[in-house]
Amino acid sequence: MLIDWTAEFESWFDALEDRAGTDPDAGQVYRLVLRQLEYLAELTAAPSQDTVTLKRVRQSRTHTVWRLAHPYRPGVAVRTIVWFPDDIHAVIALFANNKAQMGDVFYSTVGTRADQAIDRYRRQVASETNEKNQEET
C-alpha cells in the first residue's frame, strides 16, 4: 500500500518526531503511529471488512473512512483515520493524538472532520497536478 497524508498530519507528525527523543509520552505516541503506518504499508488492498486493527468509521457520510487502533496502553488512545481512494493508496486524513482525553467528542465529529480533510487533500492534489502539467507545457 502506498501511503500519503494531509498537510495537517505531516505538520503534526514532524513535530511529534522532534519531541519523541526527549518526551517519553511523545515517544510512545510516535512509536504507536509508526506501527500504524507499517500496518497500512503491509496491506495488499483496501479493506473490505473490519479487523481488530482497522475498523470502518460509521459516522462518515461522504467518504468511507477507516480508523486504525492499537493495543491498549493506559492513558493513551491514538486514532488515525484513513481513506482508501483505491486498492493501492491509503491517505491519512485525520488523527487524534490522544482520543482518551477527547472522549465521545472525537466520535461525534470524526466523520465530518474526515470528510472535510479529504476534500482539502483532493483539492491540494488537483492543484499540484495542474501546476505540474502547466510546467510541462
Image (cartoon, rainbow, N blue to C red):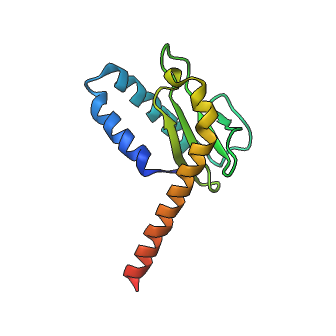
Q: Quadrant of residue 109?
A: top right
Q: Quadrant of residue 131?
A: bottom left
Q: Position of residue 54 (x, y in %)?
A: 64, 35
Q: Quadrant of the C terminus?
A: bottom left
Task: Name the residue nearer the viewer: 129 or 36.
Answer: 129
Q: Position of residue 44 (x, y in %)?
A: 62, 47
Q: Is residue 36 left or right of residue 27?
A: right
Q: Which residue occupies 32% across, 20% down?
A: 24
Q: Which residue occupies 43% across, 44% down?
A: 9
Q: Quadrant of residue 56?
A: top right
Q: Is residue 20 above or below residue 94?
A: above
Q: How many marks?
A: 0
Q: Which residue occupies 38% across, 39% down?
A: 13
Q: Which residue occupies 51% across, 56% down?
A: 120
Whether residue 22 can be seen here:
yes
Q: Is residue 28 above or below residue 94?
A: above
- As drawn, the residue found furthest toward the right would be 49
